[in-house]
Image (cartoon, rainbow, N blue to C red):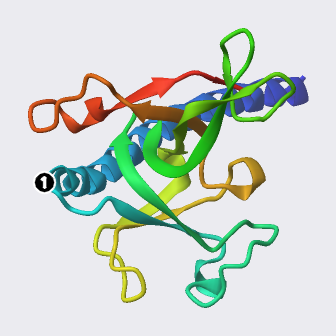
Amino acid sequence: MVGIIGIIVGSFIAYHVYFLSKKLDLKDKLTHREDIKKRVEPILAEIRKGRNSDAELINVKKYFTHYPKNNQKNKDGYTNLKGELKALTFDGIELFCGIREVYKRKDGSLTLKKEDGTTRENFNAIEAGIIPYEWIEYVDHRGDEFSYRPQFFTKFNGKDKSPYKYLVYYTESDTYHEGSDPMDMKWKIINIEK
């Protein structure tokens, strides 16, 4: 009987400890997100005033062992990558990270792959990656003596050991008016099918 009561009390305590830790975990995640945003907002303000938007993404697993001498890709990804800071989003920091050719299928949908029946579209898509706030461990807005640009110390947990959880694609907006429209309106998202 005493053993059964011990099991019930132990289960009750374990249940409440588990849900209390989940509650604390959410608060910690929100606090971390706000800390990262506070470090990045001044950088974005400077970019809007004309500062270069280049940023360096540093793989936290390889920082002390490979940076800055070795940027060879291995099982943990690259040591560092370059991106251009675009914006803060709900779920992370958005950076431009490449340009991709766009192809049009017969049905009018867009793809990044040349397939039978696709034709080369008359524009390139600008690739942007989202790094989740929880993957970013630290932001150094000044950079170091090797880069002289903001550095994002992040986990490379994305596909193929990338720092990006997912990618979105943009093209320049036809309706953007430089000087009068906010910088975020310069780009419009396009739907690319995989």
Q: Which residue is depicted at the point 59% across and 69% down?
A: 60
**Quadrant holding the N terminus:** top right
Q: How many labels does the image show?
A: 1
Q: Which residue is depicted at the point 34% across and 42% down?
A: 87
Q: Which residue is depicted at the point 72% across and 9% down?
A: 107
Q: Nearer the viewer, residue 176 or 169?
A: 176
| Residue of label 1 | 49
Residue 187: x, y in percent? 36, 32
Residue 3: x, y in percent? 89, 30
Q: Residue furthest top?
A: 107
Residue 165 located left or right of residue 86: right
Residue 7 located left or right of residue 148: right
Amino acid identity at mark 1? Lys
- Does residue 180 lie above or below 161 as drawn? above
Crowdedness of circle 1 by 10 Å Cα count: few (<14), some, many (20+)?
A: few
**Quadrant holding the C terminus:** top right
**Residue 81 visible at all:** yes
Residue 52 located left or right of residue 23: left
**Residue 165 visible at all:** no
Q: Residue furthest left?
A: 180
Residue 84 located left or right of residue 53: right
- Does residue 73 lie above or below 106 as drawn? below
Residue 151: x, y in percent? 41, 68
Q: Which residue is depicted at the point 15% across and 30% down?
A: 181
Q: State the image quarter where residue 144 is shown.
A: bottom left
Residue 166: x, y in percent? 62, 38
Q: Which structural element holds mark 1? A: loop
